[in-house]
Image (cartoon, rainbow, N blue to C red):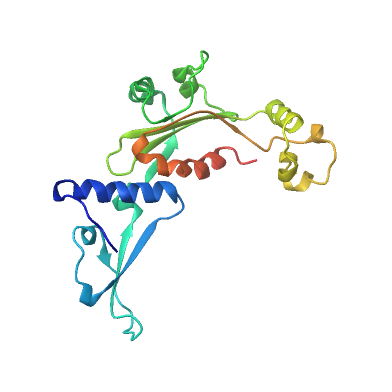
Amino acid sequence: VFFAAKPEVADDVINNIFATLYSTLPDTDHVLFALYREAGPVSPISDYFSALPERAPTDVFQGDVLWSPREHVIPDLVIRKGKVEDYDDLMPLLLAEVGVLTEMGDDFYLEELLEHQDAVHCVLVAEDAETGEIVGLMCMSSSLDDQQYFVKHFNTEPYQKLKRWHQRHEKDQAHGNKNSFQIDFFYLNVEYECRATDFLRPAFKEFPF
């Protein structure tokens, strides 16, 4: 490992390196660092790691394996259903237009979306697990008409025309059932952009086709 930075910015540089790593590799939750004992601590990088306990001595490698989890750099997100009370916290974030943000159309009325959630409309909100601060928003909907439109106008053959498993040998999609949802609007604080995938599992739970 080689690292060089001016002392006054070293911490910021390392933190940015880790944030970039996790953004580039969103499925990576841990970083391991093999450090030979004769090398000694590599400051300030070592400050971001802790040594893994050794189960059994080995002659193959004489040193420590250091470990740094993603959550030490970017806290996990808590994804929950949106509430009307979230409106006052969300709108300033959206109007600031900073972060990962899809376009707000003329018919985008967040308060109505939060209030009128049902089996085909859902709003998910992301919070910082440590501070409770709202940092993300996903608005979704599900429609058989939309699904059939996409099947008709786009190549969905690799995805079995979005049919359910038990319907995938049927030729007529018109008799199929809903098996998809669409993201109508998405916002995420730029500092948490590598956690966008945290929304997916809760989103699929809201639409259990």
The correct choice, above or below, for 200 with respect to 174 in the image is below
The correct choice, above or below, for 5 with respect to 96 in the image is below
Residue found at x 69% / y 35%: 178
Residue 114 in the figure: left or right of residue 58? right
Q: Residue furthest bottom?
A: 59
Where residue 133 appears, as percent x and y from the top left, is 30, 35
Q: Number of numbered discs present?
A: 0
| Residue nearest the observer in this picture, 162 or 19 | 19
What is the quadrant of residue 183 in the picture? top right
Q: Residue furthest left?
A: 8
| Residue nearest the observer in this picture, 45 or 113 | 45
Residue 63 in the figure: left or right of residue 209? left
Residue found at x 22% / y 62%: 46
Quadrant (top left, top right, bottom left, bottom right) of the N terminus: bottom left
Where residue 4 appears, as percent x and y from the top left, is 22, 55
What is the quadrant of residue 129 in the picture? top left
Where residue 191 appears, as percent x and y from the top left, is 34, 38
Where residue 125 appears, as percent x and y from the top left, is 42, 33
| Residue nearest the observer in this picture, 63 or 51 | 63
